[in-house]
Each structure stands twice: as structure tokens, then as C-alpha cells.
Amino acid sequence: MKILLVGSGGREHALALGLQADPACTELHCAPGNPGTAQIATNHSLDITNNEAVLSLAKSLSVDLVVVGPEVPLVNGVADVLRAAGIATFGPSKAAAQLEGSKDFAKGVMRDAGVPTARSFTCQTQPEIEHALDSFGSPYVVKDDGLAAGKGVVVTDDRQVALEHAISCKRVVIEEFLNGPEISLFGISDGRNVLPMEPAQDFKRAYDFDKGPNTGGMGAYSPLPWAPDDIVDETFEKVLAPMIAEMAARGTPFVGLLYAGLALTDHGIRVIEFNARFGDPETQVLIPRLKTPLATLLYKAATDSLDDAVLEWRDDSAVTVVLAAPGYPDAPEVNGAITNIPKIAGTKIFHAGTSQSGENLLSTGGRVITVTGIGSDLTQARDLAYRAISQIELSGSFYRSDIALNASVAEKGN
Ligand code: AMP
Ligand code: GLY
């Protein structure tokens, strides 16, 4: 099977590793890819926001499957264009990707499907906004309705800050504050069936102990030793299966990866958000733990044939830590020289925002490299990830030192 993987981040490097490890994958192409994917696949330059350019590359390579990593091309309808040309595609249609593209749309589907989530108002005028803020009270949760590259959500005790953010959005969802630990749980769907993956936890704030601004994610780990044993079954029954059924009933089946961001509250699980694609950096811990051959799995999802598929997992733990550029997330500095990337058994280096310039590796984005450690437990996985990341040199770069720390302490107590 020839595969084209669209995207260039740490998530795509991890997916490329998984796809390439499946013997069914005979040729792997990445577009645009990064210096990490270049080591295991053929990279092609591509404007991924240009649907026709994606189609033309897929056709010229005669691929059997296209896997779309990021949300922007999905919300832009690239999967529709590829499918219309008869190319099997892992990634939802434009209509189904609205689960990520519009928070108000996602709320409507959840309501119709009976999926538990925060109560909310969708507002367009200042009186509506003020009414919504005052009916929920502080802490205020204000979400830009549309895609905002991780910058659309403000959670604050300051009513003025909440109001200003809400007014700056064209359409805004204001919702009740959910208290409780957050987890990410993904379902792989062919539009009818959905296979839940193992849960992971992401660390969204920039600095240790959840200080600093929100980011795309500074680290992740899996499994979650502290989570209830039935969390996967419960999420399947209450969230993933009803969402997939509702999208199918609406005539817009969701084919691809449905990312459920959940809060485990005292009143049970609640959906915080959906994404229409694999999480980054959660993918960098899930793919190394997944035993099921990835290319075959995603091809089955793309061709409506997951009926008999099962997911199998390695009995190990993975922790990933993100090396961020100075200034991330507000104004990341780019073009810094990255040196001293170590090769340590039990670790994997995923390129996220790098480029090759002759012999030199340079930073090109806020999240530069993700380092995953894989061990028999979280403590060992953490040690490996931190041993490797501490050796990488990039002037002014930083990483969180507390990824999976509490979970590894809890694990020892068990
Ligand atoms: P999102 O971009 O939707 O993932 O939101 C970013 C972050 O805002 C989430 O990871 C949560 O930490 C926080 N958040 C979003 N919605 C809520 C909510 N209803 N209650 C509490 N925190 C929230
Ligand atoms: N890790 C959060 C995301 O992928 O949206």
C-alpha cells in the first residue's frame, strides 16, 4: 500500500513512524513532512491548504490512502476532494470536521446525541454575552466559535477579560466551568464503527505546575494509572458511539479520528471539546504503545471496514516532553541551531518545528522537538524522556519538568 501523509508536525512524525512500521505500507510519502519524516519517508513540498494541490500530489504518486494530520485542511474540505476522486482518505469531510471547526455546531450535535457536556450559550451580541457570563458566574469560560489555533479559549475569574475576549469573537460560546482532571480519549471511526484508543493526558499550560499561557500542548503520557478502570468503556458508550451514530444519522458520517477532550467531574464525564484529528502531543505517546498495525487500521477506517478490527496495546508506559522555542507560545523565535540530539535506547525523537539547512538543523516553530520515553512504567518512561531532552541544545529553549510527575508518584503508591 502506498500512503501519503499530510502535515509536518510532531504528530505527523509519530504517525509516519507507525505507518512505516506496518509491513502493509510499501511506500510512505509525507507532505510537506519535516527532517524527521525525511529519515523514514519521502518528503514532498506542498501547500496543504490548497485542496487541488493535495489531490494532484496524491494522484501523481498513485497512493492507495491519504492520511490527513492537521485540522485546517480537513475543515477546508480536502477529504471531500480526495474522496470525490476515488482516493481512500483517513480524515473527516468538511461537514463532519465542523465538530472541530465550530464549537456551536459541536454543542448542537452533542445535544441531539445526548452526550454530556458543559451547559452553554452561543452569543453574537453584547447583551447576550453579558447575560451568559452572569448566568454562569466566575470562573468564566469563553470560546471563540471558530478555529483559533489553540488561542480561542479564555478561562478567567476576571469578568472584564472574559467580556473583552467574547466581544472580540464574531460568534462565541460561553459555558459553565467544569471542575476535574482532563483527559484526551480518541476514537478511530469508519463512519459506523468506532474503536476507542487508550486515554492520554496532555499538559496545555506553558510552564511547570500549570502556570503560564495556554499552548498547543507541552507534553503527554499514557496510560493513566489514576483514571477509573471503566473510563474507556464509559467514553465509548456515552460519547464516542453516540457522536458517530448522530453524525451518520445526519448524513455526514465522521470518518477519521474523533478526539474527545474530557473533564472527569464529580458528576461524571463531560466533553470539553472535540477535535477532528489526532492530538499533538498525545499521538507521540499513543502510537509507540499501539501494537495494531497502523496503516492497515487507518485504511480499514477509510474504506468503511472496521467491523472486525480490534486495537491492541503494549503493556508499557510512554511520556513525551516538548522542547519549545524561546518566546513560545506568544512570539516564538525561529532559526535557532539545534544540536546534540541524542540516541538513547527506549527514547524516540519526533521533529515538530525543524528544518534542514545543509548540515544544520534549525528551529521553525514554537514546538520544536518532542521526546518520548518508553518504559515499563511511567517513572522509567519519564526518566528516559528527560535524560534525552536535557541533552538537546537550542539557545533559549525550554521544557516543562513536571510532565507525568504526579501520575508517576501515584503509580509508585499503588
Ligand atoms: P480547548 O481549546 O477547548 O481545548 O480549551 C483549552 C483549555 O481550556 C482546556 O484544555 C481546558 O483546560 C480549558 N477549558 C475549556 N473549557 C472548559 C470548561 N468548560 N471548564 C473548565 N475549563 C475549560
Ligand atoms: N493536544 C491538544 C490538541 O492536539 O489539540
Image (cartoon, helix red, strand yellow):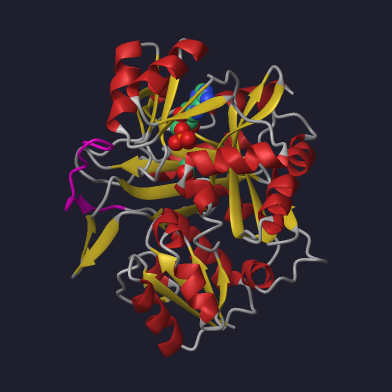
Q: Is residue 290 above or below residue 184?
A: below
Tell me if 228 is positioned left or right of 3 in this view. Answer: right
State which region is magenta.
327-340
Q: Position of residue 140 (x, y in %)?
A: 44, 17
Work out which quarter of the rendered image holds the C terminus and state it. Answer: top right
Residue at 49 percent of width and 40 percent of height? 103
Tell me if 290 is positioned left or right of 322 in this view. Answer: right
Q: Position of residue 361 (x, y in %)?
A: 24, 60
Work out which quarter of the rendered image holds the N terminus and state it. Answer: bottom right
Residue at 41 percent of width and 72 percent of height? 30
Q: Is residue 172 above or below residue 256?
A: above
* Nearer to me, 179 or 252: 252
Q: Is residue 1 above or below residue 195?
A: below
* Nearer to me, 324 or 253: 253
Q: Position of residue 372 (x, y in %)?
A: 49, 48
333 drawn magenta: yes
Does the image show residue 313? no
